[in-house]
Amino acid sequence: MLFCLQTHLKFINFQNFLYEDKYEVLVLNNYLKTKNNRSYYVLSLQYKDIIIYTTTSKKINSNHILLNFAAKEKLSFYEYFKSKFYLPSYNIVELKEFKDNFFVNYFLDQHKDEKIKQLYGALFFAKSINKELRNDVNYYGIAHLIAISGYHLGLIYSIFFFIFSIIYKYFQKRFFPYRSIHFDLGIIIFIILALYFYQIGMIASYFRSFIMAILGFYFVIRAIKLLSFLHLLLAFLICVAINPSLIFSVGFFFSCLGVFYIYLFLYHFKINNIYMIILLEISVFFAMITPVLYFFPLLSFQQLFGIILTPLFVIFYPLVLFLHIINQGNLLDGILINFLNFKLFAIDFKVDFVFFISYIFLSLLSIFHRYLAIFVISINMIFYFYLGFL
């Protein structure tokens, strides 16, 4: 019911979009591209809840512009429904720049290097990154660490719970020993997470994580089994019902798939020692290789560092958050610049669509067979064996 209502509202917005003449938009990304001996600027524009790509020969300096779109009659509802599409444009007028709020500026103004500023902008506030930084991140296979997701939500929740629990326990012992610290602090922290969600906007991976966290909180209160495929499916359906365009979001797909492989491991194996935790990290890393290669065909041994970098992020994220709070966020800039500039041999390796679909299908079937799950995850090692023979 909600899905149908949201789809209908999307169609109304689509009709209104076609009837409008001029569009006031935010420039998310702006870079020079050369193709067939012709140079032009590619703009990624945000208009309400949609992303529009366009090109221009004119250099745009502002992040806030007014323009007209051409060939709108060729735009289908299906393209609009996906919330990302291309339209040619004309009559571009630069407007006064949008300024970030004090909190965002306080964090980002601590950096001089533009790449590092973009890195922390994405890490803390889900800001878009340029093609160069995205390529650097793909070399390490750590896009899931840069995109705000459940990993970040869990860390933020843990940090606030640790801080608030010190104060809460003091008053709990004296005034309300009958209250549950997990319930009371959980409500407060979820309000903070909701405000953070409002700040960063509709980020698919964070939205999925937020919905799953709320469901998980409810399940714990009601003593319902938490780690289950039903939990993930229910969160998926709620997210899609609220925002149907998420069906076409690659970030949302990766976010759900990553959690699926975590649940798949936990379903077949018990986490009872440090070795199983390490094995969980390795298995999820390899399980995601095929889907990532299908959308981002870059293969390098450097990506294997992601197995180590992911658990280290648990230390890195709170550390850099603390450094930014005390206005010392630039302390690690030199290290990060060298880290991002480091490159090993890499190749473009495009995964065939049939192989990709077959892999996803086998992954779903592996819920019912432990050895099939092991086989599916092991398949991904062949890519690195192939790279080793080049």
Image (spheres, grey):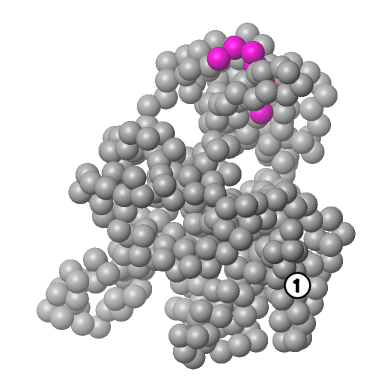
Q: Residue furthest right?
A: 354
Q: Relative to the observer, which residue lies in front, 75 or 15? A: 75
Q: Is residue 238 visible?
A: no
Q: Compared with residue 22, is residue 33 higher up or lower down, i.e. above or below?
A: below
Q: Compared with residue 136, is residue 27 higher up or lower down, i.e. above or below?
A: above
Residue at 71% x, 33% y: name it.
Answer: 85
Measuring from the top left, give residue 297's x and y in whole percent: 71, 50
Residue at 40% x, 56% y: name it.
Answer: 193
Residue at 65% x, 78% y: name it.
Answer: 264
Q: Relative to the observer, which residue lies in front, 245 or 303? A: 303
Q: What is the quadrant of the C terminus in the image?
A: bottom right
Q: Relative to the observer, which residue lies in front, 192 or 87? A: 87
- The answer to which image quadrant residue 284 occupies is bottom right
Q: Residue furthest left?
A: 174
Measuring from the top left, give residue 352's x and y in whole percent: 84, 55
Measuring from the top left, give residue 184's x and y in whole percent: 31, 70
**Could you tell me the amino acid type at mark 1?**
Ile
Give the extent of the magenta segment: 53-59
Q: In the rendered view, does 192 fall on the left or right side of 14?
A: left
Secondary structure beneath dot 1 equals helix
Residue at 19% x, 71% y: name it.
Answer: 166
- The answer to which image quadrant residue 100 occupies is top left
Q: Compared with residue 317, is residue 98 higher up or lower down, i.e. above or below?
A: above
Q: What is the quadrant of the N terminus in the image?
A: bottom right
Q: Is residue 30 rendered magenta in the image?
A: no
Q: Is residue 112 visible?
A: yes
Question: Mark 1 Cα within 10 Å, few/some/many (few <14, many 20+)?
Answer: some
Q: In the rendered view, does 121 fall on the left or right side of 22?
A: left
What residue did someone put label 1 on?
A: 379
